[in-house]
Amino acid sequence: MAAAQSVPAARVSARGWGWRHASRKRWALRDLDLEIEPGERVLLLGASGSGKSTLLQALAGVLGGSEEGESEGELLIDGLPAVQARGRAGLVLQDPDSQVILARVGDDVAFGCENLGVPREEIWRRVPEALEAVGLELPLNWPTAKLSGGQKQRLALAGTLAMRPGLLLLDEPTANLDPEGVLAVRDAVARVIERTHSSLVVVEHRVDVWLPIVDRVIALSPEGVLLADGAPDVVLAKQATELADAGVWLPGARPPVLAQRGGPGPVFLSALDLTVGRRELGQPTPGFVREGLGFDVSAGTITALTGSNGSGKTTLALTLAGLLPPIGGEVVASLELRGELGGESRLRGEPGSGALRGRSSRNLGHSRRGRNTAYPIDWRSRNLLTRIGTVFQEPEHQFLARTVREELAVGPRALKLEDAEVGRRVDELLARLRLEALAAANPFTLSGGEKRRLSVATVLATAPRVLVLDEPTFGQDARTWAELVAILGGLAAQGSAIVTATHDQLLVEALADSEVRL
């Protein structure tokens, strides 16, 4: 990467600052007092929901006005209220989808610079530099709609780096990246900071990864108050117990591998000479193909789909879940998974005593099979509810209701369960996934880690026999990670089959019975 122009590093001051989101009783952050000197590199730690993302959004001036919440105290950048210093800070959000603006990669990276009034010739010098820095080696006219989640994360980082901010704010910038990509992005950030001398605040659960490039650690308690602040080696040595109790991933910490489960049960799904891809309207061939896949998904087992960003993990997961048609080959559901569905048919007011009825796969672009009920792609959504549940990579893509409690009730109500049973399931999941205090909150206002736990809980609410999860542990602190992994392990021990697309090697080590590496 060519030498970047130096920019004045920003100073951050918080004086008794706090924020409470609208409709929430509890303050997200309160009584925050700290100074970040120009050029300092800060790793911001804390439990899921402790206010880390809220602080970064406030520093970027995008937290919202009085209609979005209530603030107290002062939060300043270079002596000005943060909301008046927009442009001094560049923010990479936790959800990369929310930062993809334009249809082509080059234009998207250039967007922030254009808003800052950077001269055109300078913009188009910075754009390829930023893409090279984050390892996104794609043509400038590549469609952003074709990017994987991890590639979108790199794109968002490139757009922010191109702006050359005086304060670089990164909210879990490596959460959806493969291990090689994590180090590549970390090193890219280090190079940019070294050359621009910007101040840095990075939120990340991967403490080990960022320690080599930061000179300060700030930790927030689960209640949103300052827990620790100082040099990394001092804080991590002297306050290790407090940090661990707060859910912080300590360097070198490895959660225990769960006890071995019993042997596999009956096969639920089979991938037979499977070819997966995404066929777009008007395109004769799919945009991505992974060919010749063959494996079984059995009761009581956990299958990990692993591989680099863009290798097809999400596409394969959605195909197994009956949400994308195979390009070739088959995904076949066994009779044990299909079962008898007479009760469900009667609830729909359909004739017949139990045949699983579905839409023709011809309507979904899969022309060979018609109405064969052995293929999940042919099933109705209600047929899938208790058979194959899916957790998407982006939690927001499956939220439908106004509150967390109502969100958890959507699936059970679609199954026409009694109110008492719906309430029982919802209360149990709120407690198991530490969401009780957020039962009345809007799902879209949760932190990234809380959204992920809610998206998992919405699928568990209908007790499907097969769970297909895309990056189920991203954004989790050490405590919620362990609880989520224990839940998944327990479901497998009870006979569920689990398929997870993941970059989390700890998750693979703790749970996976088999690994399909792409």
Image (tube, rainbow, N blue to C red):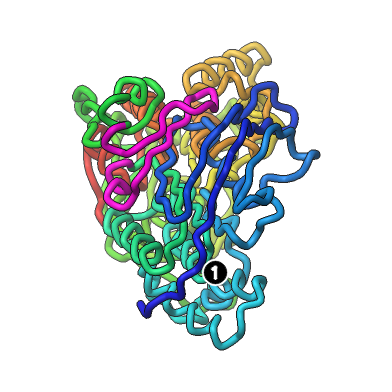
Left or right: 55 with respect to 63? left
Query: Residue 254, relative to residue 152: is it above or below?
Result: above
Closest to the observer: 26 or 300?
26
User: Does 226 lie within the magenta span?
Assistant: yes
Which residue is at 61% across, 35% downward? 15
Residue 176: x and y in percent read 41, 51
Q: Please state the horizontal and vertical placement of residue 330, each as a whole percent of the image.
A: 37, 56
Q: Is residue 269 depicted above or below 365 in this figure?
A: above
x and y, in percent, of residue 271 in the image? 32, 52
Residue 45 sits above or below residue 6 on the image: above
Q: Measuring 48% from the left and 84% from the top, which residue is drawn there? A: 125
**In the displayed image of the protein, which residue is found farthest to the right?**
67
Question: What span is in magenta?
Answer: 207-234
| Vertical arrangement, residue 103 with respect to residue 38, above or below | below
Q: Quadrant of the N terminus?
A: bottom left
Q: Which residue is mark 1?
A: 163
The answer to whether residue 347 is visible is no
Total labels: the figure holds: 1
> Hey, which quadrant is residue 84 in on the image?
bottom right
Task: Please identify the quadrant where the C terminus is shown.
Answer: bottom left
Compared across the picture, whether 294 is left or right of 105 comes to left
Residue visible at 54% across and 23% down?
223
